[in-house]
């Protein structure tokens, strides 16, 4: 029976509508799943468009292929390896910080998530800013940014375990995944893509972007798994700036996520106590029969 391992074998499933009503009234839960949605939004957009930003930044440098420090076609592999390593480090860091500080500061979990996303906001911002100057620096910065971004995942599972009754956790997790994946990870590449097309077609123009570029009509090539795409240095710069400007929205969304987790810290203890009171009330109701 769900909850038995936690000493709450007395719990009985409630109606689905009642579960939804209870979850909607749980302020920390609502704020945390909205924060998770912000993180998934950023992760989805960076996974899709971060690679393109890296590739276009190399092509836009107006260097000959022999001068490239990183081959443009290797961007997907480098970004993928970075993301895997950063994900592992981020989750381990989250576990360590939560275990260390929760015992001395009961509100630590959402605060750690908020601080983690604030750090990620700063490093993602500087990643985009320095992308036009140094690809290597951007790779270092984005590694730290993604590490901080992943610091919340182990903590959020702990938060849900002590603010949600066991009989409602499956529903709570399903709603979180639906919002985070649907509105966040799945929707963000499309939303950012629409913004990129807007910047390319309506804001950036060759006369303004390419006027000061030497050899702006020189042809550069992107080789991805044998598929070669040719473009001019001018086109590469327009593509780069369109992606860069659009991904700044990502930075803002991550910061919003940080604010939501800080706000969750206000109500986390109240909702934790409410969870315990609900369990005791159900025991009392059962003992009456």
Image (cartoon, rainbow, N blue to C red):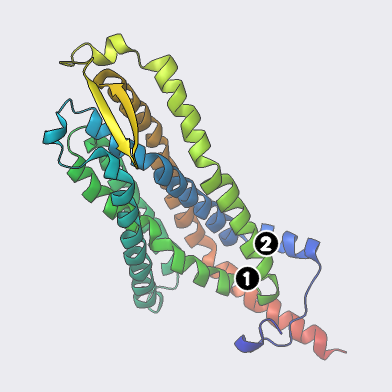
Q: Is residue 18 above or below residue 198?
A: below
Q: Which mark is residue 23?
A: 2
Does residue 142 appear to the left or right of 243 in the view shown?
left
* Residue nearer the viewer, 233 or 119: 233
Question: In which quadrant of the rendered image does the N terminus lie?
Answer: bottom right
Question: In which quadrant of the rendered image does the C terminus lie?
Answer: bottom right
Q: Is residue 206 above or below residue 145?
A: above
* The quarter of the displayed image where residue 196 is located: top left
Q: Is the residue marked by circle 1 packed among few (<14), some (14-19), or many (20+) residues within 10 Å?
A: many
Q: Is the residue marked by circle 2 packed among few (<14), some (14-19), or many (20+) residues within 10 Å?
A: many
Where is residue 7 drawn, in percent x and y?
Answer: 63, 89
Residue receiving disc 1: 164
Q: Could you tell me which residue is drawn at 21 percent across and 16 percent down?
A: 216
Where is residue 131 drawn, in percent x and y?
Answer: 24, 36
SS for callout 2: helix
Where is residue 88 drawn, in percent x and y?
Answer: 35, 66
Q: Tell me whether the residue at label 2 lies in contact with that at label 1, contact meaning CB atoms closer than 8 angstroms.
A: yes
Q: Could you tell me which residue is drawn at 28 percent across and 50 percent down?
A: 78
């Amino acid at each position: 029976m769900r909850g038995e391992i936690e000493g709450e074998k007395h719990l009985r499933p409630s109606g689905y509508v009642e579960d939804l009503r209870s979850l909607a009234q749980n302020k920390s839960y609502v704020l945390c799943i909205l924060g998770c949605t912000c993180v998934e939004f950023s992760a989805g957009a960076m996974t899709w468009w971060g690679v393109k930003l890296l590739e276009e930044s190399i092509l836009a440098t107006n260097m000959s292929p022999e001068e490239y420090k990183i081959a443009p076609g290797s961007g997907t592999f480098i970004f993928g390896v970075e993301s895997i390593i950063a994900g592992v480090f981020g989750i381990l860091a989250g576990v360590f910080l939560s275990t260390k500080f929760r015992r001395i500061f009961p509100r630590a979990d959402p605060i750690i998530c908020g601080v983690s996303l604030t750090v990620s906001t700063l490093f993602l911002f500087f990643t985009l800013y320095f992308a036009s100057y140094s690809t290597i620096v951007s790779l270092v910065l984005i590694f730290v940014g993604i590490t901080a971004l992943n610091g919340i995942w182990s903590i959020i599972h702990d938060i849900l375990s002590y603010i949600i009754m066991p009989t409602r956790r499956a529903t709570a997790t399903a709603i979180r995944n639906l919002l985070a994946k649907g509105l966040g990870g799945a929707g963000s590449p499309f939303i950012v893509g629409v913004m990129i097309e807007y910047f390319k077609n309506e804001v950036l123009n060759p006369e303004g972007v390419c006027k000061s570029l030497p050899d702006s009509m020189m042809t550069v090539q992107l080789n991805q798994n044998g598929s070669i795409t040719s473009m001019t240095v001018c086109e590469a710069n327009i593509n780069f700036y369109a992606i860069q400007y659009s991904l700044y929205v990502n930075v803002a969304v991550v910061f919003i996520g940080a604010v939501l987790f800080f706000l969750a810290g206000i109500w986390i203890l109240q909702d934790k106590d409410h969870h315990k009171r609900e369990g005791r009330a159900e025991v009392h109701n059962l003992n009456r029969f």
